[in-house]
Amino acid sequence: MECEVRYYYKKECYDELFNKLNKIDKLKYKGKFYEKTYQYNHPLKKYDFYSKNIDGRFRIRITEKDNIKKCMISWKRRLKDSLLTNKQEEVELSIKDDEIDNLFFIINNVLHLKLVECYERYRTIFYNDDVEIALDLYPFGLALEIEAKKNNNQDKIIDEYLKLLNLKIEDSYKLSWDDKYEELCKDQNKKIEKEVLFEKDMPQIM
């Protein structure tokens, strides 16, 4: 089970947050990665991943850094057992980079899953055995995500790093990136795009 909290900022806060994380002795810097994520839905209505009953996300994510390219299939489903942190069912599967084209062929032409949306971001990662903290630079803003890596004492681990970063749990954003993006579009009168890309006209967190 995944346990995490998330906060949103304007893009200009990246350097400030990076420096804060870089000064925490317990954390190691892993690097900055480019990611493109494709989110699909089931073709049958009774298995609608986006329904309130299921409330899940089926994703294909391609991650690149220098000459390294990785692909991950993941399933995430929000759980209702916590009012403060975001707890999710999570299942992941790695795909070899030379099999990516075959994967998309099967998804689109055999399973006929429906592409709901795709988005890109730059992810900067700090980590240790207990936690992974990411700075996610989206086309519309910046997210700080703190995820407990162990199954035990997850809330305690997250609380430790909230204190180090001087953050309050009640200020965290409880929903996913696409909810935040749609909120911004509605507030700023922007078209909700299926592809959330840096080259497109995007709303911005102010």
Image (spheres, rainbow, N blue to C red):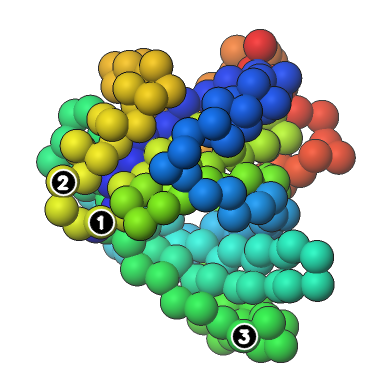
Mark whose residue sits in front, 3 or 2: 2
Kind of residue at disc 2: Asn
Mark whose residue sits in front, 1 or 3: 1
Instruction: Give me the disc on residue 41.
Output: none
Task: Name, please, the residue furthest toward the right.
Answer: 199
Answer few, some or many: residues within 10 Å of disc 2's Cα (few below 14, many 20 plus, some between 14 and 19): few
Q: Residue at x 33, y 17 (%)?
A: 168
Circle 1 sits on which residue?
150
Answer few, some or many: residues within 10 Å of disc 1's Cα (few below 14, many 20 plus, some between 14 and 19): some
Kind of residue at disc 3: Lys
Could you say whether the residue bearing mark 3 is in a helix, strand or loop? Answer: loop
Circle 2 sits on which residue?
153
Q: Quadrant of the C terminus?
A: top right
Q: Quadrant of the N terminus?
A: bottom left
Answer few, some or many: residues within 10 Å of disc 3's Cα (few below 14, many 20 plus, some between 14 and 19): few
State the separation of the CA atoms marked 3 and 2. Answer: 33 Å
Q: Residue at x 62, y 85 (%)?
A: 96
Above or below, comparing residue 16 to residue 38 in the picture: above
Contact between marks 1 and 3 (CB within 8 A): the answer is no
State the separation of the CA atoms marked 1 and 2. Answer: 7 Å
Whether residue 132 sits left or right of residue 188 in the image: it is left
Contact between marks 1 and 2 (CB within 8 A): the answer is yes
Lower sequence index among marks 1 and 3: 3
Kind of residue at disc 1: Lys
Circle 3 sits on which residue?
96
Task: Name, please, the residue furthest toward the front.
Answer: 25
Nearer to the camera, 140 or 116: 140
Name the image quarter holding residue 161: top left
Q: Position of residue 34 (x, y in %)?
A: 72, 54
Can residue 118 be seen from the camera position used here?
Answer: no
Q: Position of residue 59 (x, y in %)?
A: 51, 62
